[in-house]
Image: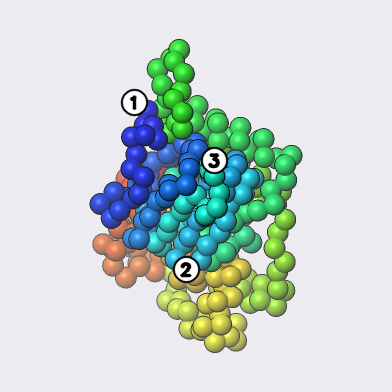
Amino acid sequence: MPVHAEDLPVTAAVADPSPPPGLVVTGRYDQRPGYGVNRPGGSASWLFTFTLGGRGLLRQGAARARAGAGDLVVLAPGTGHRYTVAPGTESWRFWWTHCQARPSWTTWLAPYAVSDGLYAVTSVPGAVRGRIEAAFGRMLADSTGPAEGTEREPDPVAVAHGCLARELALCALEEVVLLAAGGARTPPAAADADARVRRAEELIAADPGAPHTVRSLAESVALSPSRFAHLFTLRTGRSPMRALREARLRHAARLLEATDLTVERVAAASGFCSPFHFSRVFRARYGVPPGAYRAGEGR
């Protein structure tokens, strides 16, 4: 059964969280002043928004981004956020999707990081906006919809049920991210900062299970911990510890796919001291516990 905008609360609270990361939920809204969603505890899933008209204002922690027509703004899970129709604007028309982002997407979004977990891809060329809108339309069509032969109600929202629908939706969203990030004007980069950040990323990738800390990574590139953390977050859109956790989870996923190591040994080999903590963060990342992932669920 489809879910429609009028069935959803206007303002989210702790007791009314975002969709879980295992779901792919897509919608198209046309909102007026007064609309807003506030999640002080953050979201369990990523939120992708693509503005069609009017303006929106999105905040992640202390950072903010204004979204105008043709802008893709993305909020990562884990940090309190809120979004509203921008003050002084008559409406905000936008596509949105809640889901678990694929790991490669953060690399494409990184040059457009406003802060740790907030990405604003602006200046998307008009030539690709139609393709982006069409991709969102496919996501909606491939997800749960109204009965055959009926028309959709205004502001539809749909959930991608089943493995095929989820994969089709995620492939369409990947197209959105590629088109937006590939076509937009990339912000200028500082070459010296990039080299040090790249070196730290290489150290993490080479051995994600090592006992890396902000201090040890900073020392490896001859920076103070505070300066290193600032540069790393600025250039990658993630804090060093968030990047390390993602690398460890990717490493753990590969071990589950390719070896018969126990979950406890996979946790230890990936840098997690506690198998219970590992199982919790793995499930939050992939939507299923490690054992179910090894059995083929969530992939």
Q: Which residue is mark 1?
A: 1
Do tag 1 and tag 2 residues touch (Cβ < 8 Å)? no
Q: Amino acid at mark 1?
A: Met
* Residue at the image position 64 percent from the left and 45 percent from the top: 70
Q: Secondary structure at mark 1?
A: loop
Q: Which mark lies nearer to you, 3 or 1?
A: 3
User: Spatial distance from mark 1 to mark 2, Cα to Cα?
Assistant: 38 Å
Q: Amino acid at mark 2?
A: Ala
Instruction: Assign the N terminus to one quadrant of the image.
Output: top left
Q: Nearer the viewer, residue 52 or 209?
A: 52
- Residue 235 in view: yes
Quadrant of res 159: top left
Q: Secondary structure at mark 2?
A: loop
Please tell me how crowded label 1 is: few (under 14), some (14-19), or many (20+) other residues with Cα within 10 Å: few
**Is 65 situated left or right of 251 in this image?**
right
- Mark 3 and mark 2 lie on one chain; the one further toward the N terminus is 2
Q: Nearer the viewer, residue 135 or 114?
A: 114
